[in-house]
Image (cartoon, helix red, strand yellow):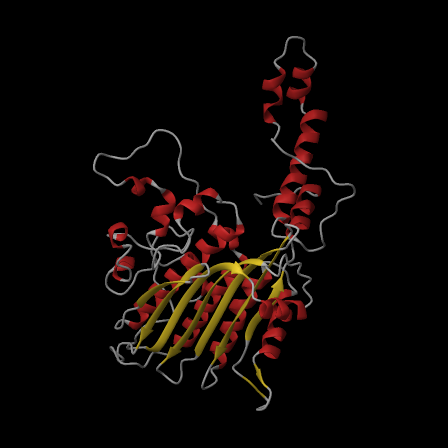
Amino acid sequence: MHLGGLSAGPCWRAARAGCGELSAWSRRYAVGRLCRPPGTTCPQQSRGLGHGPTTGGSPRLRTGVAAGLAGLAGLAAAAFGQVERAEMVRKSSGTPSTLPGKPEEDDDELARRCSCFMAPPVTDLSELRTRPEDMKTKMELLILETQAQVCQALAQVDGGARFSVDRWERKEGGGGISCVLQDGHVFEKAGVSISVVHGNLSEEAAKQMRSRGKMLKTKDGKLPFSAMGVSSVIHPKNPHAPTIHFNYRYFEIEEADGNKQWWFGGGCDLTPTYLNQEDAVHFHRTLKEACDQHGPDLYPKYKKWCDDYFFIAHRGERRGIGGIFFDDLDSPSKEEEKLWQQLRRGRYVEFNLLYDRGTKFGLFTPGSRIESILMSLPLTARWEYMHSPSENSKEAEILEVLRHPRDWVH
């Protein structure tokens, strides 16, 4: 299961019974359904992970299981840069299409999406529907989706043990879902957990954050926060298959003046017992490919951060062969793409009003209906003085094409 297999190909199915086998909560929705990563359309043969013809149900895997586990890291790495995957689909408006005797929630896109999660979201669906564009909503749905995909993939590979699902609540606010598989055919222990918590930050936690350079303004000693993330540790039985860990999280703090600070953090690393050169190269190449989609400088920076972070000082050793690690990631702005969209819409307005023949003809023709003529203009647009996108950015890439048209056919 390389990254391509995880994110763009196979239908994720739990051993023997699809997503319903793993979650009693989702069984009513999941009968006969396949849980797929977003964007997938058809089943394909997954690669890498699996039992060889001579292994049967034994704990030993064929060569390639480590590369397969590295593929799971690829899924997590891709999730780091694909927060938009958690885009919430608004509930359909208009005349209900619910059939007599059919539960109304079956026609609710969000409820259908959540039906393949390991358990219901921590936040009530009613609240999630009220804030579909909020990063907290997007992130919660993303981590639940990631948890379900990874659990289903691991259960399929193990072919024996099943995940126990523990949905817990935090009295101070929020909760989480812990999924654990133990003593399986392949995995000694595999855990995939999510948490979505909120409340007031403790003074100790605030002090730790200030030590990292964050200026936090409290009110009456209180600092409201929201935090959520997905984490996983997978320990195979076979000593030639590595342990893998990943964790990705989002943090948001509201200061006394109403200002919000936010950042992402996390990482992914591989810990083999015995070195397999091919696996090590595949693992790091997968992470690099995911990072390179967002900037060529990210992988080298995050790899070094990981090597330095997972260091056992008194041994002079790293915990494993590394991966990526980052924290306090609050740039580029999570609203940067929306800003660029508004700027490009400004160009759209400029052309229509200054050059478009139909618009100009309508504006200068007596008796024309102005509202209809200007219907082509967007609701919102933006102009900034001397705005220029960063070099090698996605914005610079499209600007180059707009300035120098390409032949897209030959």
* Residue at the right extreme, as displayed: 386
Question: Where does the C terminus fall, quadrant-wise?
Answer: top right
Residue 389 position within the rendered picture, expressed as x and y whole percent measured from the top left: 71, 49
* Residue at the left extreme, as displayed: 101
Identify the residue at image location x=70%, y=14%: 364
Query: Is residue 127 positioned above or below 229 on the image?
Result: above
Q: Nearer the viewer, residue 126 or 265?
A: 126
**Residue 384: quarter of image:** top right
Apparent side of residue 169 relative to residue 387 in the rendered image (left or right): left
Residue 82 position within the rendered picture, expressed as x and y whole percent measured from the top left: 52, 56
Query: Is residue 335 positioned above or below 352 on the image?
Result: below
Identify the residue at image location x=22%, y=34%: 100
* Residue at the top extreme, as displayed: 367
Q: Nearer the viewer, residue 254 or 310?
A: 254
Residue 32 position within the rendered picture, expressed as x and y whole percent measured from the top left: 24, 52
Q: How many marks?
A: 0
